[in-house]
Each structure stands twice: as structure tokens, then as C-alpha cells.
Amino acid sequence: MESSLSTKHLLGIKYITSEDIRLIFETARQFKEVINRPIKKVPSLRDITIANLFFENSTRTKLSFELAEKRLSADVINFSAAASSVKKGETLLDTVNNILSMKVDMLVMRHPAPGAPMFLSQHIDASIVNAGDGTHEHPTQALLDGYSMNEKLGDLEGKKILIVGDIKHSRVALSNIFCLQKLGATVRVCGPPTLLPKHIKELGVEVSYNIRDSLNWCDVANILRIQLERQDVKYIPSLREYSQYFGINKALLDSLDKEIVIMHPGPMNRGVEITSDVADSEHSIILQQVENGVAIRMAVLFLLAGNRS
Amino acid sequence: MKVLIKNAKVLQQSSSYHGDRLDIMVENGKINAIDSAISKSADHIIQSEDTHISLGWVDIGCHSGQPGNEQRETLKSLSEAGAKGGYTHLFISPDTQPVLDNRMQVEYLQRFQSDAAVQLHTLGALSHGLLGKDLSEMLDMAEAGCKVFTDTNRSEQHTNLLQRGLEYAKSNDLCILQSPFDPSLAIDGHMHEGKQSTMLGLPGIPSISEHQALSKLIDLQKYTESKLIAHLISCKESVALIKKAKSNSNKISCTLAYQNLVHTDKALYFFDSNFKVFPPLRSDEDREELKNALLDGTIDILCSNHTPLEEEKKKLEFPYADFGMTSLEVCFSKTLETLGKENLDIIIKAISNRPRQLMGISEAKIEIGARADLTIFDPSQRWTYLKSKSLSKNNPYFGQELNGSVIATILENQININ
């Protein structure tokens, strides 16, 4: 296995190799051991300053990154757009260059515009980790999802992974597709046609509008949140109807011929895409995903720090 | 002033000199000698390894900053960029501020004179203020010299206005030039809808937002029997529609932006906003169809789609960047690179002869006694694109070595030598 990543930034899963993914998993495995010890902190990123730039709201991703950074002994500063000069009309590039002048080494950025981290990477020197850019990618989420599946099922080669819900507005879906394909899994997406991108098949995924059939097909179902905040026009008539025809509930799971693993990147709309008796059941690995998120982010930050020029 | 062009291959299919290599003397704005070898003295002697000469080139729908956005482009910088790119006639899109929608604006543009050998023409706004509601005073503008009217890509929502515009245009044999686009089918769209937009998570501008609007435009043309130029078609479905429409009517023609001939949506893989243009760069298949359609004459005119934008509008996160690329200076070279020298005749037809016919530019010829309206170029010469005459720098080609260079343009007494 390679000992370093092929890239200086993590901008999207499509821009990294399957070797990169395996290296991140292996490194995360070691960090997961670390964070389960009584002393959870390692000095790996001492003297490295990381800025978390969140131009869009986030709870778990932000906390997870901050925790990962602190476990690695990095110095951390936080920035959120609500309390910033962005509202006064400053450009992203100016904002970031100002922060970098304060001798920041790495950036973790969430931004509403697809491609914003890529744009930044073309104009600045610091390493960038994309923590979600609009409807483009959310690479660390896909990595922690892939890692969690890997933990549960072993090698993902030939495994059948279903992604359910609002694929059109989901950066998680896109990053998951790229990640799982690079690990050899077969991916199917399922949801109402208006929430599936018209050309999604061209990415090499299967497409279905039938939830029962799809659940029966898969080894893992990754249930996405309905992103009402990213829908300018209504793509589905009502949440009630969505829940009725695409929501995952216990009765539906019980009626399957097999047991499957249930995942959700959070935050969940309980009672909409997933019912509580599924989210809290033994099939669900939702909380393991969150735990793995910290280890994955430690691995990403650690490996990228080693690749800084 | 005397200008002697040495050993130039003449490219003008209607001329008896077509295909010949000749010396041409221009004196006091007119061609006064054409011979296999002219040995008279001249103020300027123009020659290159593989000199070619054609009638001056014409660009339709290029965007000017002036009036309103002079930081992007002035009429002077636009003319100079045009001359550098080989053009002697530029038809300026009416979407300036204020909009070019009345006689005064047409005359304002006509009064402008630069040293560049370029004549500026107005594409008149079809509707007042480009609002798609009331017809502009087309006859009054026509009297001032404006023969072609457009609501750019804005008025597809206003079917009724288009119908009235097409009908009204008939009274003076005017022509309507319209970009087919239905924005309601491309909400928040930033690039062609396809595999690439899906991979980039960007909302798409599907081909149907164009060809559905084109279909309507063609129906309206059929109903009104007016002259229509479908401007900047970009997808394979539009090519099929134009082909069919042309078999039914000789009053329909269409244009293509060279970007859609040269690039595809794959250019956007790294979110380079320089490639964010409108109409959007489409798929390989679309590009292939457009290329065939240009070669077989289905597409009449090749345009630069020159859209100058200041850095503040382009150096941004991709979705926030404006659409457009500066292109007058490179349109010919990039096209030549794509189509090859073997198709030079077709390229010249699409940037000179056809637009001259369709836009009603007063007749020019490569004959003794004809007024000089000429572009001299060398399709074999390579050049490096280092500096632009345009005030804006929004294109991806700086520093590139390009194929085929423009040597000079002559418009009567004005000469521009690169």
C-alpha cells in the first residue's frame, strides 16, 4: 500500500484514487484504536493550524472535524459565515486569503457553491478539505460511510449498496457513488423520478423507483435526508406521500426475504424517510457512522498534512 | 495610401480569382490592381509564407461593454479586438445599458469611429428595453441602418411578442435573429445537463430548453413567413430541427458559437469558470453533430459569441460566475484547429460570405475597382496568444500557441496590421 496520498487536497472522491481510499481506511483504523484508548490524543499535528470555514450550517460535520483536529493536537480556529464579513460583500478568495495571512496551514471548508473548494485550491497554497460543497461532493461523509460498511461487511467488492431518497440535491449520494464504485461495489439509487438526476445512469449506477424491490436487492441501504432547503421548486407533492411510498419502516424491513444494514448520514427526519423503530434497531449502524467519522477525518487531516508542500 | 498584398491565395467562391495566388494592390480604399506579380511601390507591403485573402470577416452578436459597462469593453477596444481577430464588421448585441432599442442608439453606434478597420453595426432590440412586451420602433431604426432585430435569448417566454415582431419585420424585409431558450426548463442551470453536470452536482441547462424553444420559433416563422436566423444553436436536436425547417423554407438560417464547435462540457471538470458560456458547452455527440452541420451547410454562420466580463464577474465560485468568454481574437484560430486547413473554404464561408448575405452588408468583391473590405491571413502560421486588445481577459487561451494567424484587415481607407 502507498504511504502517502496522491493529492494535496481532498476536494472530492472523484479526484482521488482507490489506493488513496484504502490508505485513508487503514489510517483511520489506527486512529479508531487511538480514540478508544483512555488517552485519546496524539501529537501528530502539533504546530499545525487548521481553520474550519463553514459558509453553510452544520452540526455533526463541524463537531466531528473539530474533534478530529483536537485529537491530533492541531490548533483550531472556527469561522462561520453568519458572523463574518461575507455578509458585507467580501469575496471568498479575500476572506480566505485574510485567514491564511494569519499563518493557517490547512482549511476545512463547507460552502453552498458546488466547486468552491476546487476554485480555492486553484488560487491558494494551503491544503483544503471539502466538508461539503453544495450539491457536489461531501468526501469525508462518503469515506466514513464506506469505512463503516467495510467494517460491517468486509471487502465491498461485489456488494450491493442502495442509496435511497433525494439523489438530485445530495452531495452525499454523489460522493458515495464515486467511493463505492472505486471500492468495487454495485450501487443502485432509488427514489421518486423527480429526485433522481436524469443522467445518473451514466455514472454506472442502477436506477429504481421501487423501494421494496430495491431493499430486497441490496446488502446495505443508505437512507438520505429529504433536502427541502435545497428545493426551490417542489419535486414531490408532500412529505406524507414520500414517507408512504419511499420511507423505510419496520413493517417494510420485516417483510423482506433478508436482513440488510441501514445507514443514514444524518440529520434524520424521523417519520419521513426513516421511522424511529428502524433508526434505532439492530439493523442500523447510524451511530457507528458518527464514531467512524472522527477517525476518518483524523486520517484525512493527518495524511494531507504529510503531503503539504 | 497604397497597400500591396503579395502572393495571396484568393478565397472567394463567387470570384473568378478563387483559388489563385495573386498580388493585390489597394489604393485609396479600392482594389486597383490584381495580377500574378505587381512590382509597384506601396506604403505597406503585406506578405507571409502562406498568405490568404478573403472578403472581410463578420461577427454577429458580439457583446460590447459600452454603453453602460465600459470597464468590460469600450467600442474602441471591441473594434481593436475585432480587427485583431480578422473582422471588418461587428454586429453588436443590443443588451447594453441602455438597451439598443431606438434610432438614437443606432446612430450613437454609427457615429463611433475608431482607427481600427472595423465597421460597427447595431443588432436592434426587438422589444423596448428587451423586456419582451412592446415592439421597439423597428422601422425608424431600420431607416438608420439597422436591419436585424433580436431579443437575444430573453423573449422565448413572450411568444406573442415574437409573433408580432416577426410579422412587423415583413413590412421592410427585416430579419429577426433569436436565440432559442426556455429558461423555465433550465432553472438555476450552470452548464449542459448530462453526465458531466451530474458528476459535478451542478444544476443543468438541458438541451430541451433550447430545442423546444427552437421548435416554437420555427413554427412562428412558418406562420408569419418572415426571415428568421436561429442564433447560437448548440445541441444535436436543434440541428435536426433546422435541417427540416430549411427543407420547407428558404427564410430560415442559423448560427453557431465557435465554443460549441471546439469544446465540450468535459472542459468544466475542474470548475473552470472561463468555460462557463451560454449556450453551454454540450456533449461530444452534440459537438460532432454541430461540426457536421457546419460542414454540410446546415449551419450558415459561425460566431465568436464574444462576451467580455471583468475579473470580478469571473474569478468566483463557479455558480456565481457570469456566463461568457472573450473570443474575437481567437475564434478563427480555434475553429481552424478543430476543422483543419482542408475546410478553410467552409470556415471563410461561415465567417464572411454567409453572414454578409444574411445580414445585408453592402456588396464587396475581390475585383478590380471594388471597395476594399478584406481580411488577409496565414492559416499555416502559428502564434502565441499573449496579449489581448479587449479590456477583459476572460478566456482560457492565454499563453497558448494557436494555429492560423490574421495578418491584416483593410476596410476602405483604414488598415489594421497585426
Image (cartoon, coloured by chain):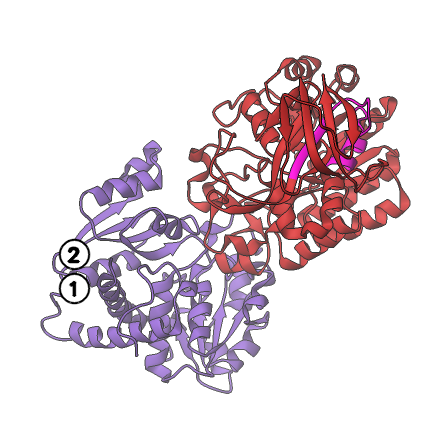
Using the rendered image of the protein, determine whether residue A272 is visible from the camera's viewpoint.
no
Foreground: A237 or A228? A228
Quadrant in which residue A296 is drawn: bottom left
Q: Residues within 10 Å of mark 1 (few under 14, many from 20)?
A: many
Q: In the picture, residue B374 is in which quadrant?
A: top right
Q: Is residue B380 left or right of residue A161?
A: right
Identify residue for label 1.
A72
Q: Colour of chain B?
A: red
Q: Nearer the viewer, mark 2 or mark 1?
A: 2
Q: Position of residue A240 (x, y in %)?
A: 52, 60
Q: Position of residue A134 (x, y in %)?
A: 43, 52
Instruction: Verify CB contact (< 8 Å) between mark 2 and mark 1.
Output: yes
- SS of the residue under disc 2: loop
Q: Which residue occupies 51% across, 47% down?
A: B401
Q: Do circles 2 and 1 both sit on a common chain?
A: yes
Residue B114 in the magenta stretch? The answer is: no
Host chain of mark 2 = A
Q: Label 1 amino acid? A: Leu
Q: What quarter of the picture does the N terminus of chain B occupy?
A: top right
Residue at 47% x, 53% y: name it: A228
Q: Amino acid at mark 2?
A: Ile
The chain letter for the residue carrying disc 1 is A
Looking at the rendering, the stretch of residues picked out in magenta corresponds to B352-377
Question: Compared with residue A52, is residue A1 higher up or lower down, i.e. above or below?
Answer: below
Q: Which mark is residue A48?
A: 2
Query: In the picture provided, is B263 more to the left or to the right than A113?
Result: right
Helix, strand or loop under label 1: loop
